[in-house]
Image (cartoon, helix red, strand yellow):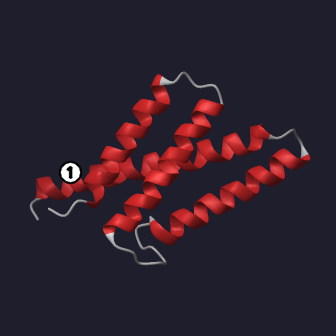
Amino acid sequence: MTEVSQRSQFVIQALRALFHLVIVLSITIWAMFAWSFPLPGLVIGLGVFVLTVVIWALFLSPKPMLATDRFGQSLIELLLIGGAVAAMLELGVFWVIPVVFGIAAAVVGFLATAKR
């Protein structure tokens, strides 16, 4: 690979990592605020956080624990993106922001996994 393509792959992977971080945080924040505080909200928020991170680690991490093909990874990634968009909408974020976030995350995920 040339230096330019290595740099562009690094930027795409960094953007994908940032999108994954926002996905995990938005789902976790939704889970915390969907139930009343302190006990059910914190426990469910922590449980959903752990579940989301485990799903990410199993399928989407740079070295996934369960090796799947590109289509399986894309399906899991799209499910997490959909969950994050739904969580943002449920939290009351203006609808344009989650829609743009979902489209951008899907495009970056596609570019990150596309074989060149």
| Residue 108 drawn at (x, y percent) | 32, 47
Left or right placement of residue 93 versus residue 43 in this view: left
At a point 55% along the width and 43% down the height, the residue shown is 84
Please report the residue visible at 28 percent of the width from the left and 49 percent of the height from the top. Answer: 11
Q: As displayed, is residue 29 above or below residue 95?
A: below
Residue 15 in sight from this viewpoint = yes
Instruction: Give left or right: position of 25 versus 38.
Output: left
Q: How many marks?
A: 1
Give the residue number, with chain letter if any, for mark 1: 8
User: Quick one: label 1, few (<14), some, or many (20+) residues within 10 Å?
Assistant: few
Residues 41 and 21: in front is 41
| Quarter of the picture holding the C terminus | bottom left
Quadrant of the image occupied by residue 91: top right
Residue farthest to the left, as pictured: 2
Observer-nearest of 98 and 72: 72
Tell me the element at label 1.
helix
- Comparing 5 with 54, the one in front is 54
* Residue drawn where x is 39% and y is 75% of the image: 68
The N terminus - image quarter? bottom left
Q: Amino acid at mark 1?
A: Ser
Which image quadrant for residue 113?
bottom left
Residue 76 image point, x, y percent: 46, 60
Residue found at the far right of this picture: 39
Q: Is residue 10 visible?
A: no
Horizontal relation, residue 5 to residue 59: left or right? left
- Whether 58 is drawn above or below 77: the answer is below
> Residue 8 appears at what percent x and percent y?
20, 51
